[in-house]
Image (cartoon, coloured by chain):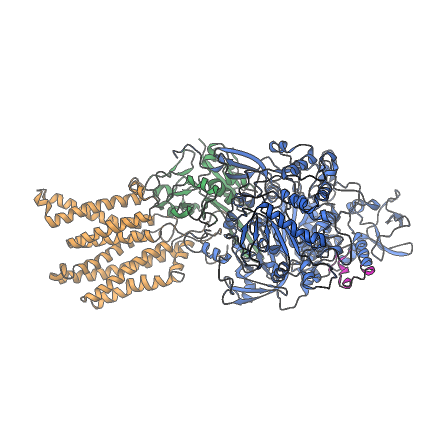
Chain colours: A orange, B blue, C green
């Protein structure tokens, strides 16, 4: 068989790359909100920054749930998604979300009202709550990436870099939002903390970019379908949003701004917007450019 | 899953009935499931019926969507928009049946009383010949239906000469080497496609039958064959002659067959006629005694096939020698210049074909020992639709003649149209030991007349099937053909000539606009119903009765159609409609008379129709059933009347007669026609192509090869099984599969050709022939001959009121000629390939930007997301 | 207990898609939905070029990726090996659809029944009757016509196939036609590298 460019066939009855058409924008919205919220929670958690934690939980709890239910074919039965943690990352993630919201809320309350003291529970209980909240937030940041990476159907997704990229994007987004939210409060006193976090955000951005590049690189080398996805993103029909939004707005612009003007609120605000636009575009495009492998093995 | 009721349609509570498919003209047996609520929800192939061998093709599977099509005509209607045009809304107004009949009968009657020749019929329900023959009731031989040219204008008459049958097929039960040339038989189309492809697949896989497909495109047949031989369009005859050359040159010939079973040894004089004595008996040459004898002389020792002799002072040659002389100029090297098929390929295939034919082998079937010739050359429309169609057909038959496989087990078989009654024979003895030629397989043709009595000049095609494209030629050249009447009324039934006729649409539009009155009986809107004044909606195939059997290879019998539901709408059967019209027109008695004869009812007098009675579809079906096997319609409800074809009818039914290797009748027909034309001073007689009348195929090129150089490619048209015999697009299930198939969604070119034309896949183009033009989008595939531009039938529709039909950029047939220059003077078969040139456009022309086009649908399917919905 | 499988004879298949329409008929599939598709692939360079037609449907994998990712337990495998979706349990998250490497699952969109097969915003009686089987929003797929199989019949696509290119039977029975064909003509499962262990095999 001639190794020509693999044909993209939509729903034609040909052998070629078929578009994934089940996880669409509402799913991308849900992934974005879930990860971003958990990322914000997690970074704020590290700084004991309650407004950030609460906002993170609200983003996850309200928006992610909303978009998930929008996506769900039978919303009234969505609760059933919790039933199979033994095999399904969706179930595990849903349990993670419940834990994250539950323990995150407890932790926030504890931070605000010092519940453990007033209830006389001792530090162990508080630590346990913290631990569960943090772990659950980690699960929420990554499980969607795991769910995708478990799909052998779609080469672009089928890599452990997928949950890693979820984690990195979530943390980057969370960090930059934490910086913004804490501009006049949290970091008013500790500018060194802000500096550190900004440098760490820059580092996360860099690693995140490398991971995205690696995802494309590995997809391109893995299979015909992977090649098609990469072609779609780099030179094909999604090249403009990929280069302008994911790369330009999402990595280059914020990196420059955070490097050149880390102390300038407007610059950081613009950088944060860029990061979120890039992140969101990435989430949408990674679904849109996912294709099934061309049928093979029959001859 | 808690629901105890099944969800799959075939298992729901309801009943199954036995019936017959009508999604194409062939009559496949079906079983239909009807739910307790009266909904038809599943149609399967009748597992017991050999007519379909238990199978059903995609079209048959889609019949339910035709039945429930919301675009169906739901009651009689009259046009209220006096303006007529291809995109004029007729503004239908529902009327009563009585009013519809009254208007229709009144308008037809005007012409009938004035001059019946002014009526143009297009009655094309191929499963109801009882409707087809209606015009004969008032002596009208006009023909506005496309059937003849779009299938086998030359094919059917040739089969009539060679097999005394309507069609032909290879004997799949014994064939081991199957050449398919310009046909999908056994893979995608033509005779009983479901059954035939089943038998062919079994032969290929279980018996190892080798298939070779000769075609300009990698068709389904080519894709499944062991070998695809790409050929330049419109050169198939030359390929066949190249094969014959090799076979004769290398003695790869069944001489015994030619001597015993054909007229190949008959001596032919310089005038081309057989050499006869005073009693009209034909001479042959005994090469042992080296003298001429009469053909039935019992002392003949060995018939000469070759040589030049003298009889009664006249130089003469055996017919076979005449063919040899022609073949002298048909070396594979010479033919390669025309066909592009490498000479070595031709030589190899000729040898393989001969070897597979196993000359000398015999087989005993039902106690009869016969030659076994398991190699056969099959062909159809793609190869035979030539200006010199008769010669093309004859050339293909010659390949079969040379190995003695005509009607032999494993060979190339005649297939009857309709057997009518169990013991009817389709062959009869003719003169001088030969079989009676029977070219008029579709009934009588009009006698010669000048001025002509038919508008399409059928008066001058004594051998042919109707050439309806000449209606346009005559219309656009008033006066030239001496026609003394102007047609003004059209009666159309289950026919879509405005879609199917060849020649530019603009011409046909003018033709239609010149009609005073057009009545159409059909079930859904088409390009033709668009022009109607009155619509007489008929029952669908799942609401009506019928009894038929169409062109069954390998089988015989009758297939009964019965209603699966009450009519969904206020419709009538075609019988009800035409009987009612007959009565109102005062031709009822004549119509019944025609039916008694044409349907063969006069064979069993008790079945004959009474002169002044109207009959229902069920009564007609019942009679046809009784005619076949004396069983009434109720018997057919419970029994399958289709059986394997009896071997005495299938194999060499002409045993003891000689076949027409040399078709001398061509010269009789030519000279009689010439004489009559001279006598009547027919002004266009010098334009008549007398050379087309040849008792043997020649190498003369078809005029499509002589078009101006600028038309550098050959445009050709094709179908596959989803589009077999029309009536498909607009059915959502058919659309579903057709527009997902890469073959059917673009104007196809070989990539190298596209590159040399400066084109790439996706380019919008205008394609022009010397006769017309179309628009479309280029697709490329390695499966195309570099000289060909291929256009699928799926790209042929125009905007009509049926919302499910996406329009394309014009019909390929627009680019085909409709003139005498491109019409076989023998059979009326027009050329079906055209020369084209391609021009790249920046955008679609106006008119193709609006509305749903095929290309919109295709783009929707190919884009991300859930595309391709209707 | 039988273990059902299907063999596709690529030498027989003529790509006519009668199976596709037969399936749509049998299962009242809404617009744009297919439980089986016959693909085509062209290979080679003119004139040495060929085309193969490849029937596809749910491979009823032994090690079904769709079943593994189903969070609600809707996807399960019957004792006879047919992979089923219980519409009562399905939540329509479509995880299974993106997990199936063969793209053999479809979602019953909520708007799927609005426009009808003719796009006229009305349903034909055939559709009205047939669509009752679907729970909007759920995921559906080929189940080898399990009801027909339970009734001792072959799947609808198999009975209509003009060339008998689809052969259905018991993979555990060494004497079944499917076992014989797989053995004698070296049946290959689709995309074996994915280790899904399909119960569908191709022979050519």
Q: Position of residue B158 (x, y in %)?
A: 73, 50
- Can you tell which quarter of the image residue B775 is in? bottom right
Q: Where B60 falls versus A26 (above or below)?
A: above
Depth check, front residue: A92 or C194: A92
The relative height of residue B539 versus residue A5 in the rendered view (above or below) is above
Any part of residue B280 in sight:
yes
Residue B655 position, x and y percent, is 77, 40
Instruction: Judge by depth and name the residue closer to the eye, B132 or B833.
Output: B132
Residue B123, visible in the rendered structure: no
- Classify the position of the N terminus of chain B by image quarter: top left
Which secondary structure is most common in the magenta stretch?
loop
Count of marks overlaid on the render: 0
Residue B573's image quarter?
Answer: top right
Q: In this view, does C88 lie to the left or right of B125?
A: left
Image spot of residue A295 (x, y percent): 46, 49
Would you say B654 lies left or right of C49 here? Answer: right
Please tell me whether residue B678 belongs to the stretch shown in magenta. Answer: yes
- Seen from the viewer's position, the closer of residues A78 and B681 is B681
Q: In this view, does B590 lie above or below B142?
A: above
Return the x and y of residue B667 as percentages of the image width and height: 80, 55
- Magenta includes B611? no
Q: Which residues make up the magenta segment?
A: B677-699
Instruction: Kindly identify the residue that appears in the image at 43 percent across and 56 percent down.
Output: B863
Q: In this view, does B447 lie to the left or right of B856?
A: right
């Amino acid at each position: 068989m001639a190794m020509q460019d693999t044909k993209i066939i939509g729903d034609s009855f040909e052998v070629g790359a078929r578009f994934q058409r089940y996880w669409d924008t509402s799913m991308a919205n849900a992934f974005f909100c879930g990860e971003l919220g958990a990322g914000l929670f997690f970074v704020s958690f590290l700084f004991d920054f309650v407004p950030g934690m609460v906002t993170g939980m609200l983003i996850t709890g309200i928006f992610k749930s909303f978009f998930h239910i929008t996506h769900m074919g039978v919303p009234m039965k969505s609760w059933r998604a919790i039933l199979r943690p033994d095999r399904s990352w969706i179930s595990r993630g849903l349990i993670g979300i419940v834990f994250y919201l539950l323990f995150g809320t407890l932790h926030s309350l504890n931070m605000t009202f010092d519940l453990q003291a007033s209830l006389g529970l001792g530090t162990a209980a508080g630590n346990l709550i913290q631990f569960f909240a943090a772990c659950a937030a980690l699960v929420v940041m990554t499980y969607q990436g795991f769910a995708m990476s478990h799909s052998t159907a779609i080469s672009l997704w089928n890599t452990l870099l997928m949950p890693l990229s979820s984690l990195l994007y979530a943390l980057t987004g969370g960090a930059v939002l934490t910086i913004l939210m804490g501009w006049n409060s949290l970091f008013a006193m500790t500018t060194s903390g802000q500096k550190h976090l900004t440098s760490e955000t820059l580092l996360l951005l860099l690693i995140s970019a490398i991971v995205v590049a690696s995802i494309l690189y590995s997809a391109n080398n893995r299979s015909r379908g992977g090649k098609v996805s990469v072609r779609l993103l780099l030179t094909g029909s999604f090249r403009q949003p990929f280069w302008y939004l994911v790369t330009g707005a999402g990595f280059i612009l914020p990196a420059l701004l955070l490097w050149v003007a880390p102390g300038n609120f407007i610059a950081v605000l613009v950088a944060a917007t860029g990061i979120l636009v890039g992140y969101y575009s990435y989430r949408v495009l990674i679904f849109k450019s996912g294709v099934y492998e061309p049928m093979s093995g029959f001859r | 899953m808690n629901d105890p009721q099944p969800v799959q349609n075939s298992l729901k509570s309801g009943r199954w009935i036995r019936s017959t498919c009508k999604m194409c003209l062939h009559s496949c047996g079906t079983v239909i499931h009807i739910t307790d609520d009266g909904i038809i929800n599943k149609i399967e192939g009748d597992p017991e019926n050999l007519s379909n061998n238990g199978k059903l093709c995609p079209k048959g599977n889609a019949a339910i969507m035709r039945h429930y099509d919301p675009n169906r005509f739901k009651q009689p209607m009259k046009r209220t928009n006096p303006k007529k045009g291809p995109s004029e809304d007729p503004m239908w107004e529902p009327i009563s049946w009585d009013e519809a009949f009254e208007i229709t009968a009144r308008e037809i009657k005007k012409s009938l009383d004035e001059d019946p020749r002014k009526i143009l019929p297009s009655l094309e329900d191929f499963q109801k010949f009882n409707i087809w023959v209606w015009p004969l009731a008032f002596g009208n031989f006009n023909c506005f239906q496309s059937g003849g040219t779009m299938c086998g204008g030359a094919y059917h008459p040739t089969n009539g000469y060679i097999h005394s049958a309507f069609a032909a097929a290879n004997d799949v039960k014994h064939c081991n080497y199957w050449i398919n040339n310009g046909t999908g038989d056994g893979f995608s189309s033509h005779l009983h496609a479901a059954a035939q492809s089943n038998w062919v697949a079994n032969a290929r896989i279980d018996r190892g039958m080798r298939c070779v497909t000769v075609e300009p495109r990698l068709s389904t047949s080519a894709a499944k064959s062991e070998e695809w031989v790409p050929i330049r369009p419109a050169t198939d005859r030359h390929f066949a002659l190249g094969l014959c050359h090799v076979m004769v040159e290398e003695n790869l010939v069944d001489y015994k067959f030619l001597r015993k079973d054909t007229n190949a040894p008959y001596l032919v004089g310089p005038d081309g006629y057989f050499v006869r004595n005073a009693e009209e008996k034909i001479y042959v040459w005994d090469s042992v005694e080296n003298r001429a004898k009469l053909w039935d002389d019992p002392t003949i020792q060995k018939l000469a096939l070759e040589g030049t002799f003298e009889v009664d002072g006249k130089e003469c040659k055996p017919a076979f020698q005449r063919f040899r002389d022609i073949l002298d100029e048909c070396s594979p090297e010479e033919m390669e210049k025309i066909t592009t098929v490498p000479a070595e390929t031709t030589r190899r295939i000729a040898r393989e074909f001969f070897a597979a034919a196993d000359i000398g082998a015999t087989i005993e079937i039902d106690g009869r020992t016969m030659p076994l010739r398991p190699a056969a050359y099959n062909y159809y429309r793609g190869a035979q639709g030539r200006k010199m169609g008769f010669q093309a057909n004859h050339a293909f038959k010659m390949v079969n003649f040379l190995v003695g496989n005509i009607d032999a087990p494993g060979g190339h078989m005649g297939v009857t149209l309709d057997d009518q009654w169990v013991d009817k024979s389709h062959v009869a003895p003719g003169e001088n030991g030969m079989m009676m030629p029977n070219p008029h397989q579709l009934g009588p043709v009009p006698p010669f007349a000048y001025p002509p009595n038919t508008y399409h000049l059928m008066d001058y095609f004594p051998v042919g099937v109707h050439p309806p494209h000449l209606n346009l030629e005559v219309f656009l050249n008033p006066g030239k053909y001496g026609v003394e009447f102007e047609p003004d009324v059209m009666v159309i039934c289950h026919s879509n000539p405005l879609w199917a006729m060849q020649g530019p649409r603009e011409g046909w539009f003018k033709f239609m606009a010149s009609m005073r009155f057009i009545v159409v009986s059909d079930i859904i809107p088409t390009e033709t119903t668009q022009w109607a004044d009155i619509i007489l909606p008929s029952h669908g195939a799942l609401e009506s009765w019928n009894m038929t059997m169409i062109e069954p290879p390998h089988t015989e019998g009758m297939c009964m159609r019965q209603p699966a539901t009450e009519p969904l709408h206020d419709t009538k059967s075609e019988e009800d409609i035409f009987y009612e019209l007959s009565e109102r027109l005062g031709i009822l008695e004549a119509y019944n008379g025609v039916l008694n004869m044409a349907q063969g009812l006069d064979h069993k007098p008790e079945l004959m129709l009474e002169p002044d009675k109207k009959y229902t579809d069920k009564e007609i079906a019942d009679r046809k059933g009784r005619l076949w096997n004396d069983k009434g319609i109720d018997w057919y409800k419970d029994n399958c009347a289709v059986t394997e074809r009896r071997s005495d009818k299938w194999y060499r039914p002409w045993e003891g007669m000689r076949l027409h290797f040399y078709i001398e009748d061509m010269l009789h027909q030519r000279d009689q026609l010439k004489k009559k034309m001279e006598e009547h001073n027919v002004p266009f007689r010098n334009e008549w192509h007398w050379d087309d009348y040849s008792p043997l195929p020649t190498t003369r090129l078809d005029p499509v090869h002589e078009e101006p150089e600028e038309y550098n490619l050959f445009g050709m048209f094709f179908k596959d099984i989803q589009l077999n015999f029309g009536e498909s697009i607009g059915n959502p299930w058919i659309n579903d599969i057709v527009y997902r198939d890469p073959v059917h969604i673009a104007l196809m070119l070989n990539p190298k050709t596209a590159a040399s034309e400066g084109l790439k896949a996706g380019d919008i183009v205008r394609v022009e022939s010397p006769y017309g033009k179309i628009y479309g989008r280029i697709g490329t595939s390695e499966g195309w001959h570099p000289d060909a531009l291929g256009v699928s039938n799926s790209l042929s529709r125009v905007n009509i009121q049926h919302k499910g039909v996406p329009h394309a950029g014009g019909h390929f047939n627009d680019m085909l000629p409709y003139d005498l220059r491109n019409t076989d003077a023998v059979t009326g078969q027009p050329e079906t390939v055209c020369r084209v040139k391609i021009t790249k456009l920046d955008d679609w022309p106006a008119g193709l930007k609006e509305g749903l086009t095929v290309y919109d649908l295709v783009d929707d399917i190919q884009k991300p997301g859930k595309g391709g919905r209707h | 207990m039988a273990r059902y499988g299907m063999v596709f004879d690529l030498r027989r298949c003529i790509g006519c898609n009668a199976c596709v329409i037969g399936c749509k008929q049998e299962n009242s599939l809404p617009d744009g939905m297919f439980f089986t598709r016959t693909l085509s692939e062209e290979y080679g360079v003119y004139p040495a070029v060929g085309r193969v037609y490849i029937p596809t449907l749910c491979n009823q994998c032994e090690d079904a990726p769709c079943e593994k990712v189903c969070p609600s337990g809707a996807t399960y495998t019957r004792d006879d090996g047919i992979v089923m979706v219980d519409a009562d349990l399905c939540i329509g998250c479509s995880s299974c659809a993106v997990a199936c490497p063969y793209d053999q699952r479809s979602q019953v969109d909520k708007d799927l029944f609005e426009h009808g097969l003719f796009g006229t915003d009305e349903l034909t009686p055939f559709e009205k009757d047939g669509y009752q089987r679907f729970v909007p929003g759920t995921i559906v797929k080929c189940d080898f016509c399990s009801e027909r199989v339970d009734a001792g019949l072959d799947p609808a696509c198999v009975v209509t196939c003009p060339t008998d290119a689809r052969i259905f039977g018991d993979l555990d029975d060494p004497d079944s036609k499917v076992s014989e064909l797989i053995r004698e003509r070296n049946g290959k499962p689709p995309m074996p590298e994915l280790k899904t262990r399909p119960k569908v095999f191709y022979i050519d």
